[in-house]
Amino acid sequence: MSTFRRAQSQAHPNKTSTLMLAIIMLLILNVTIQIWLLYNGLNNALDHNPGIAIPAFVGSFFIFLINCGLLYYLPKGRKQ
Amino acid sequence: MNEKIPDWKNDFPISQAETTDVTRRQFAKFLCLVSGGLATGSAFVAAKSALFPEKKVSGSHRVCNKNDVPVGGTRPFVLEGSTTPYILIHLENGEFKAYEQKCTHLSCAVFYKPGTGKLECPCHNGWFDAMTGEVVQGPPPRPLPKLEVEVKGEDIFVTGA
């Protein structure tokens, strides 16, 4: 049985590619932010400024959850 | 010719392309794994700084006699019960300064360059101001940790800053 989604995917196969690229770009951006948070949390902790480390961790963990959520939207592979 | 498929191909039915090619799905999942690793790293840093804060130097410690360090000269020392290397500097203006002798970049030993008023880290060309310990140039992200220096009579003492 054909569905709307399947018909759409067949009519516009490039959508999958665009979506995949968009998700990967978002993931790379989020990972970059996490690297920045880790770097600054660490440097401030070593500089006797421990107040930064905990908010940095909370932010980093939140971004990790967002990244896991993004995986849900990964397009399915083309059905054989 | 009757070519027989070797047994190992049945045991490991994975083509070479499958083992080397990375699909975009796999790449996205890998990025998510990296993200989890970074979050774990941040958790470790937060836990370390909140639960096991670095001990500050307490009390006053004698380093050496004032005349042991000529002007422009330095003297390395360690405090009792600690392995952290420190360096005592007799600046050209007559002041004494004491810093941790570990570059804040990758912990190489730093050296005072006489006449310049700067400490040099030879590993990656990092420079620190000998008066304040601030970074002047190079990759170090933080100023050098310093100790307060007190001259009592002929002796030099350091205390935690």
Image (cartoon, rainbow, N blue to C red):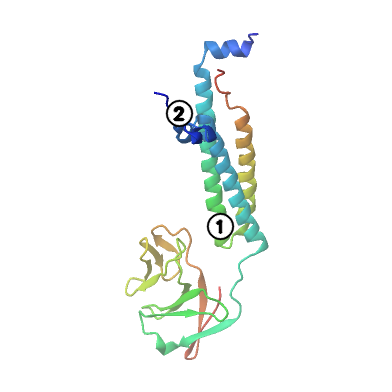
**Could you tell me if residue A16 is visible in this image?**
yes
Residue at x-position 44% and y-position 65%: B103
* Residue B142 drawn above or below residue A21: below
Image quadrant holding the C terminus of chain B, namely: bottom right
Image depth: mark 1 or mark 2 in front: 2
Residue assigned mark 2: B4
Residue assigned mark 1: A44
Local crowd size for mark 2, using a 10 Å CA cut-off: few (<14), some (14–19), many (≥20): few
Local crowd size for mark 1, using a 10 Å CA cut-off: few (<14), some (14–19), many (≥20): some
Q: Is residue B138 found left or right of A19 in the rendered image?
A: left
What is the residue that sits farthest to the bottom in this orientation? B154
* Residue A34 picture location, percent across and down: 55, 45
* Residue A62 drawn above or below residue B119: above
Which amino acid type is marked by label 1? Answer: Asn
* Residue A63 picture location, percent across and down: 61, 40
Count every numbered label the image shows and give the total.
2
* Residue B54 picture location, percent across and down: 60, 67
Which amino acid type is marked by label 2? Answer: Lys
Residue at x-position 60% and y-position 44%: B36
Residue at x-position 61% and y-position 14%: A5
Residue at x-position 37% and y-position 63%: B123
What number is the disc on residue B71? none
- Gap between marks 1 and 2 measured at Cα: 65 Å
Q: Is residue B54 found left or right of B153 in the rendered image?
A: right
> Chain under label 1?
A
